[in-house]
Image: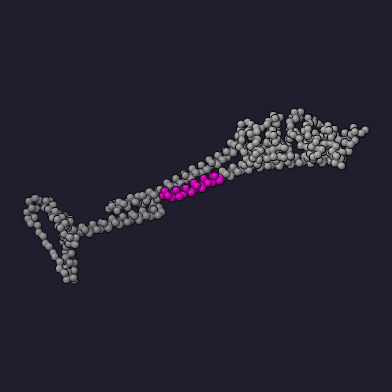
Amino acid sequence: MAFAVLATLIPTFVTTVVSYQQNRESLTETIAAELRGATSESAREMGSWLDERLDALREAASSYVVTENLSRIEGRDGAQALARLRAYLNSLRERFPDQEALLVLDASGRIVTSSSGRMGSVRLPPEGLTGLRTGEALVGDAYWDGALGKATIILAVPIREADGRFIAAFAAKLNLHAVTDMLPRLSPLDSGEVALMTDQGRLVIRSRVSSAELMRTKLPETMTSALFEKEGQTVVYKRADGQEVMGALRRVTRLHWVAVAEIPLAQALGRVGRLRSGTVLLLAALLTVVGLLAYVLGLLIARPLGRLTTAAAKVAAGDLLVELPGGGVGEVGYLTRVFNTLVARLRERESQAELERLSVTDALTGLYNRRHLMGTLATEVQRSRRLRRPFSVLLADVDHFKQYNDTHGHPAGDVALAKIADILRKTTRGVDCVA
């Protein structure tokens, strides 16, 4: 019984533990894949966002309206040329839905004209114009524009003559609302979030959060160094607010930004903990089922077999009064009924043997009676004739028995007869007949 239970329990237990380990590894890998996927998708989306804006700028800057009117600004029609440039910039609003201002800057970086509306401050990095002279585009640093109350960034492309000579720059001041709205959609799991920060660890935007205070926040180097060193891998670290998180990082190269996806460590461990709790509950249920199974098997098999064993030992010792309840089912019930039938037949045989013994023995002395003696004599006579061998008959008489019986009474005489019968039994052989 115990071996049967163990044979069921041990493989199931081992299978459950192994399954838990595999599910835990799978769950951990799923969380890591969610984080890596969020950072990769964020980097890809940011790259697409940047490419779309730069392509739109290049297309707008390549218009003949720009180059033609720039060449006329210094002439007598300069005012009309500026008016046409401004009108052209205002006509491009639909092409740049997240623009705060479109600007044309001359070769020295001075603003020639801009679209109407609140422009706020415009920041070009010192090396910006130099880069435009030799490169294809300028991607400025993101900053918080206090006048607009928005996170903004400057993008610019060069304006060149037909011979390739750099004459001006076409720039757009864009707000980052589209990026702010995009990040929550890319956040991993339920409570995770995606943040964008610069290569130097300064925050730009966090999911659903864009503020001047946020953009002034610089993350600890101990935190960012671990993320940069293991780009594309999950890292456990403590944020500036003291919360432990699991995160991953992916670079957005052209923006000099990085996308960081984070999930609170407590949530990640909570999912593993729920898996562990589920496994413990499964094991508890397994133990309960096995315990109930063992109890039922004990009632149906072990206990009846124990009773059978005890009863068989009593029968072997000569006790034929054993009686087992016969209400069992299955093989054990059948075995119990067969055992009861066997004991009943043994009792019947013993009773028949007792009756036969009583029919051929004297009740007082226990010696064979006259009937058995006569049958034995007839048998021995036939055997003697057949084998031509003699046999002996010894007749014994107890002297003065009648006088002893009359003097001491019949009970004393009975005792004397029983004693004499016992002496005769002990002094004769097993093949002899004493009657």
Q: Position of residue 351 (x, y in %)?
A: 25, 56
Q: Is residue 316 visible?
A: yes
Closest to the observer: 424 or 399?
424
Give the residue drawn at x 65%, y 36%. Answer: 225
Residue at the farthest right position: 76
Q: How is the image coloured?
A: one colour
Q: Is residue 377 left or right of residue 228?
A: left
Give the residue drawn at x 49%, y 46%. Answer: 13
Give the residue drawn at x 83%, y 31%. Answer: 110
Closest to the observer: 15 or 132?
132
Image height of 251 relative to 8, above or below: above
Q: Is residue 360 left or right of residue 50?
A: left
Report the predominant secondary structure element of the magenta stretch: helix
* Quadrant assignment for the C terminus: bottom left
Q: Position of residue 330 (x, y in %)?
A: 41, 54
Closest to the observer: 206 or 93?
206
Q: Position of residue 41 (x, y in %)?
A: 69, 42
Q: Which residues are magenta?
A: 1-23
Quadrant of the image occupied by residue 380: bottom left
Q: Is residue 157 visible?
A: no
Give the residue drawn at x 54%, y 44%. Answer: 20
Q: Position of residue 289 (x, y in %)?
A: 47, 46
Is residue 277 part of the magenta span, yes or no? no
Closest to the observer: 382 or 122?
122
Q: Is residue 215 left or right of residue 356?
A: right
Q: Is residue 287 left or right of residue 364?
A: right
